[in-house]
Image (cartoon, rainbow, N blue to C red):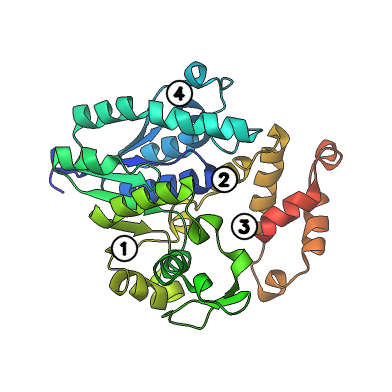
């Protein structure tokens, strides 16, 4: 683009749980890498989890920032700093967290009206952003953190209701690109009967259908048949832009940050960084790729400072590396 004023300005609004925030923040960073002016709306505790990554992107010359919205802890009765589903300790707190999202609606709406971005990318749990986008006469893109396959399966069960005509405990998903059978007990309760969550999902789905389209953290070569089903049978416009984590998390600091997010102690960050540096500087030969992970663990442990060997759950760290 010829000037800063011509850059597209897109606001991203993630839902407050790691499984939604991580891919959506990565997605926002991908847009920033492609010369888009990006703003991510987060509450303070959630913002702190990503700030270092965003700061590195800014140093790399990308126009990206986090806009922090105060979290209404006192209003909903949550302790300070509890701002995501990953930090709650009871189902009661889950309800309080959901109530907090309703209280965040007004300040977020006001922010969008004040800033007037060119586009809004919002998580499925914020269907009301469609109304804001319509008021501003800008497109709203829906974000889904799951796969085409799961969304197509959900659609099939909802539309064809195979469990209602099944002669056994096994049902087939009608009209699918491949033969898929499931136990009725494996179907979500909200798909089999009408619950409060069913009504919530209906509202989300309706907002997606009326949005400009859906951004999917997937890629054509992985789910081509179900991508086609999603676009033709379900009739939704979609773009496959994944796997976004591979496009943006390419240095050691980014990778360590993703592991620390999962909830570990401070010294784990040091150990994880050492693990990754050893791996990335190792001769990545076929022999190393097929090496037993216990041998990798032993090799890495031998190179760590002694104090970390007695304070770290290395079996967990091996699981992280296996991912």
Label 4 near label 1: C-beta < 8 Å?
no
**CA distance for labels 1 and 3:** 32 Å
Please give the residue where the numbered disc 1 appears in the rendered image.
239
Do the CB atoms of the residues marked 3 and 4 lie less than 8 Å apart? no
- Give the camera-side residue of 202 and 241: 202
Is 124 situated left or right of 49 in this image?
Answer: left
> What residue does disc 4 label?
71
Reading the chain from its start, which is encountered first: label 1 or label 4? 4
For the residue labelled by badge 1, is the local secondary structure a helix, a strand or a loop? strand
Tag 4's secondary structure?
loop
Q: Position of residue 84 (x, y in %)?
A: 53, 35
Q: Which mark is residue 280?
A: 3
Residue neighbourhood size for the residue with mark 2, other residues' Cα within 10 Å, grouped as few (<14), some (14–19), many (≥20): some
Label 3, secondary structure: give it. Answer: helix
Q: Nearer the viewer, mark 2 or mark 3?
A: 2
Q: Is residue 188 left or right of 272 when viewed as pictured?
A: left
Q: Which of marks 4 and 3 precedes in the sequence? A: 4
Image quarter of the C terminus: bottom right
Determine contact: label 2, label 4, CB under 8 Å.
no
Residue at (39% x, 30% y) in the render = 102
Looking at marks 1 and 2 on the same chain, the residue that comes earlier in the sequence is marked by 1
Between the C-alphas of marks 3 and 4, the distance is 39 Å
Above or below, 115 against 300 in this view is above
Cα separation, mark 1 vs mark 2, equals 25 Å
> Disc 2 or 3, which lies upstream in sequence?
2
State the mark number for residue 258.
Answer: 2
**Residue 263: image location, x then y, percent:** 65, 39
Q: In 3D space, how far apart are the residues under numbered discs 2 and 3 (Cα atoms)? A: 17 Å
């Amino acid at each position: 683009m010829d000037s800063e004023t011509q850059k597209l300005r897109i606001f991203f609004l993630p839902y407050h749980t790691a499984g939604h925030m991580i891919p959506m923040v990565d997605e926002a960073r991908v847009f920033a890498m492609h010369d888009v002016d990006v703003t991510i709306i987060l509450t303070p505790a959630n913002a702190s989890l990503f700030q270092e990554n965003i700061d590195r992107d800014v140093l790399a010359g990308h126009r990206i920032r986090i806009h922090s919205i105060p979290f209404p802890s006192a209003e909903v009765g949550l302790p300070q700093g509890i701002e995501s589903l990953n930090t709650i300790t009871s189902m009661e707190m889950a309800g309080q967290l959901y109530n907090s999202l309703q209280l965040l609606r007004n300040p977020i709406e006001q922010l969008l009206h004040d800033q007037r971005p060119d586009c809004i990318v919002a998580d499925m749990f914020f269907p009301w952003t469609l109304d804001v986008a319509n008021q501003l006469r800008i497109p709203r893109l829906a974000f889904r953190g799951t796969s085409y396959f799961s969304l197509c399966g959900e659609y099939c069960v909802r539309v064809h209701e195979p469990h209602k005509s099944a002669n056994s405990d096994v049902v087939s998903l009608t009209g699918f690109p491949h033969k898929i059978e499931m136990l009725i007990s494996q179907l979500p309760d909200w798909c089999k009967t009408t619950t409060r969550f069913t009504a919530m999902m209906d509202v989300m789905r309706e907002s997606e259908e009326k949005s400009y389209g859906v951004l999917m953290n997937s890629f054509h070569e992985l789910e081509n048949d179900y991508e086609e089903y999603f676009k033709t049978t379900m009739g939704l416009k979609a773009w496959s832009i994944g796997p976004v984590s591979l496009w943006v998390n390419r240095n050691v600091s980014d990778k360590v940050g993703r592991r620390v997010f999962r909830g570990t102690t401070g010294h784990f960050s040091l150990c994880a960084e050492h693990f990754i540096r050893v791996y990335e500087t190792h001769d990545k030969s076929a022999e190393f790729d097929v090496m037993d992970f216990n041998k990798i663990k032993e090799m890495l442990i031998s190179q760590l400072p002694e104090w970390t060997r007695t304070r770290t759950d290395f079996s967990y760290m091996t699981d992280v590396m296996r991912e």
